[in-house]
Amino acid sequence: MDEDDFATGLVVDKVQWMGYTKVILKADNERALQKLVVAALKRLRLEVQEIEQATKEQPQTYHSQSNGGTEVGIKNLRKDYRTSGCASSRGWSARSR
């Protein structure tokens, strides 16, 4: 974890911005990510009054496909971000899908 809790702050800010009242955080079994999830859940429960439920979903141990959907979603977001970033840097209007 970083000393300013930057990463947990990002999670809390985005959940609050999206307006969700029920949240399930999921990460792979890497210790650093699991620690981040626990810290983010604590901050969500303390700082976001609208949260009704904040839980953690534990992935299966040694199961390579347990985060497959999440990985595909991240890949698509990165692709869309890069596409819009390239388009805006060249003066083109970015098309949304």
Image (cartoon, rainbow, N blue to C red):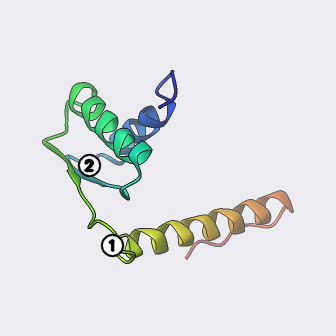
Dot label at residue 24: none
Query: Mark 1, residues whose alpha carbon is within 10 Å: few (<14), some, or many (≥20)?
Result: some
Residue 70 rendering spot, x and y as whole percentages: 41, 68
Question: Which image quadrant: the C terminus?
Answer: bottom right
Q: Are marks 1 and 2 in contact (CB under 8 Å)?
A: no
In primary-sequence order, the first of circles 1 and 2 is 2
Residue 23 rendering spot, x and y as whole percentages: 23, 50
Residue ID for mark 2: 20
Three-letter amino acid code at the position of disc 1: Ser
Residue ID for mark 1: 66
73 sits left or right of 61 in the view? right
Who's the residue at 59% across and 71% down the image? 96
Three-letter amino acid code at the position of disc 2: Tyr
Who's the residue at 42% across and 35% down the image? 8
Q: What element does badge 1 sit on?
A: loop
Q: Which image quadrant is residue 85 in?
A: bottom right
3 sits left or right of 12 in the view? right
- Camera-near label (1 vs 2) is 1
Who's the residue at 50% across and 22% down the image? 4
Question: For this rendering, which residue is in front, 27 or 76?
Answer: 27
Q: Residue furthest front?
A: 62
* Residues at marks 1 and 2, CA–CA distance in whole angstroms: 24 Å
Residue 92 rendering spot, x and y as whole percentages: 80, 67
Q: What element does badge 2 sit on?
A: loop
Q: Is residue 54 above or below residue 50?
A: below
Q: Residue furthest top?
A: 3
Question: For this rendering, which residue is in front, 63 or 14?
Answer: 63
